[in-house]
Image: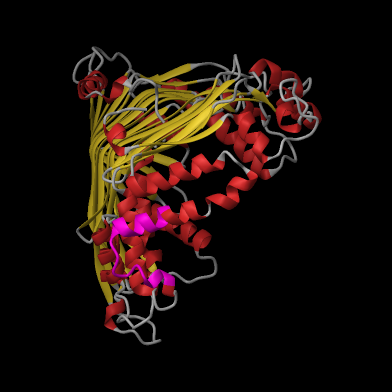
Amino acid sequence: MSWLANFRALALSSVLAIAPVLPSVPESPPQVTAESATDALFARLEARPATSTSNLDVESLNAALAGSARLSYGFATQETLTAPTRLTGFRFELLGDKPTTLFTADEVLVWNANTEALIARLNGQQLDTTVRLFDRIEMSGLKFDLTDYTNAVDEAVAAAILPGETVDIGYDDASMNVGRVILGGMTLHPWTFEETEGEEEGLAAIRVISALARSFSLEAAVFLNGDISQTITEAGASGTIISRYDRQLVEGYDRGDIASMIQTGVSFSGSIPVPDVTAGLDAAPLTSMRSVEMAGRSGYSAWTGLRFASLLEYGERGELPPITARDLWSFGTYTLADTEMSLGGKPMFEIGRLDIAADKFAWFLPERISVTHQDASLNLVEILKWAEEIEPSAPPEEGAEPTVAEIIGILERTGLGKLSGDGAFSLTWDSETGSAKLASNNTSDGLYTDETRVELRLPTYAQLVPVFGVDGKTPDDTALSALLDEQFTFIGGHYSLSDGGLLNALAALSIEVAKFSGEDDPMLGNFANSTPEAVRMFASGMVMFGAGAVSQDVPQATDWIASLSQFINTGGTFKIAFEPETSLSAADFTGAGAETGMAESPDFAELVDLFGLSVTHVPAAETAAGSP
């Protein structure tokens, strides 16, 4: 089996690491990203209630569980009349044919437990009322045995990715320890699910899951000082992965809405076994194994403002929400900061900060999606070095494709070995006015900066609603097409690319390619001993050489090609702008617009004038000075 299949362990660890806070950019950064705000939030959630006047009745609860589960403990007490119920040596077991201990805890504290209400719900009573189950539960010294669960997940993943293949890999041990868990007040809401006879299985599952998600609220869940340890065996060799979590919380879960999910101080490290391809390269199955070291960390991540409660109402009924359900859902905002990962001791990537926002929707129509990243980097050279160590290339042969080691050398010589920079992307649609904008700007350190802007006008939300019929769920395709034709308007746009070393890097890359491929392509081979400056000058000349033929059909292209040629040769900034005299509708592209003066669809030259297309070159000196 390919060694890549073994990285399911890494994938599972990554999922476990981000699951509590799984997620560009909001117009203003989320306030919870401030260190002080995060510390204050954890401190507030760690504060205990002043009093507890209702004991947890464990024995009555065990009787109600009727042999399906059991709560056991070594000692129980309530130190004062207003103190919480205290249990030590606690164990929660699932009974049946194969009893399983779900978790153990050194100590459990319970404030204001409503045992009667919980028992009533377990007995199918009080389903139409809202009940408060407890104000707070604290557990310390928790231990979970995840071995069976992790193996089951791994087998399911293997069956999906490698169907029909026998996978000789398993988890000898998987456990989770948490120093302290705090559960804030929990409320059960009326159980409104109704079974439907003969219902399709998939739809029934969606309805049940939606009903469960809507059936409770939880003020907070806090996890402090946790770790997950997994021991993996592959063909007799073992490896261990340990993930650590300083602080995690989920705040304000309310029937599908989540105020925030935050974690700080996440790290993982360990090794996994992979076949050692250096031990033998014949056709026989590999039996020798080696370990691959890996490590990673994330200083902070947060997902805030998730709203799914309204959507889950329709999910429980098994219905598609109508377009009139405007305020339906939100994916909120996600932040990831101070994150890195390495394999075999080699740094693979780093993220200083990543912000994602998908927090505004009208029905299922996004009004804002944005992404920004700062100080992000991808180390291509180190990735290839690691791959070469795992599976070395065959010795180089004359005239053959370059080996991994040779590619590494090419990347290092051309300055493309490590890519880093900042960037932002946003896509917005104003549902009230129909105004839509696409914007992006990126900086690649030592290579380039670019900027893209496109502005359109699309149908408004109010204009779209009637197209979806009386029920709001059945779009009229003809009416929708007519609406788009009528309302679509192109307002303008531009793209600019400023050279910061990219042109020289690409020219140097061409020279390196020529050294390997020159014998097959004599023209390319001429550049094997050239310089980046000479390659750029040649490319600039070749662009001008083709200008004549293009200009015959599009006279405006003469200036465009000259600008492109100057950019390739001297750098600076290359700009393409679309600035029509008036906003363009779909009719303008078919010759039917009132402003076009054309009886039929415009040809390419006419389109150039229609769009107000211009192509310009800004010299490097002006670009450096910040001139447009």
> Is residue 386 something one can see in this rendering?
yes
Quadrant where the C terminus sits is top left
Q: In x, y percent, where is residue 160? A: 52, 59
Residue 534 lies within the magenta run: yes
Query: Dividing the picture into quarters, in which one does residue 4 lie?
Result: bottom left
Is 160 on the left-hand or right-hand side of 206? left
Note whether 94 is above or below 280 in the view shown.
above
Q: Residue at the spot x=56%, y=51% of the render? A: 548
Residue 433 lies within the magenta run: no
Q: Foreground: 366 or 378? A: 378
| Color scheme of the displayed model | secondary structure
> Is residue 475 something one can see in this rendering?
no
Q: Residue at the spot x=59%, y=49% of the render? A: 550
Q: Foreground: 375 or 576? A: 576
Q: Foreground: 442 or 137? A: 442
Q: In x, y percent, where is residue 389? A: 25, 70
Q: In x, y percent, where is residue 93? A: 37, 44
Note whether 456 is above or below 200 in the view shown.
above
Is 273 on the left-hand or right-hand side of 252? left
Is 557 on the left-hand or right-hand side of 152? right
How many numbered callouts? Answer: 0
Note whether 179 is above or below 528 in the view shown.
above
Q: In x, y percent, where is residue 24? A: 41, 31
Query: Dividing the picture into quarters, in which one does residue 432 lie?
Result: top right
Q: Which residues are magenta?
A: 523-540
Quadrant where the N terminus sits is bottom left
Magenta span dominant secondary structure: helix
Is 571 on the left-hand or right-hand side of 162? left
Q: Residue at the spot x=58%, y=29% of the render? A: 612
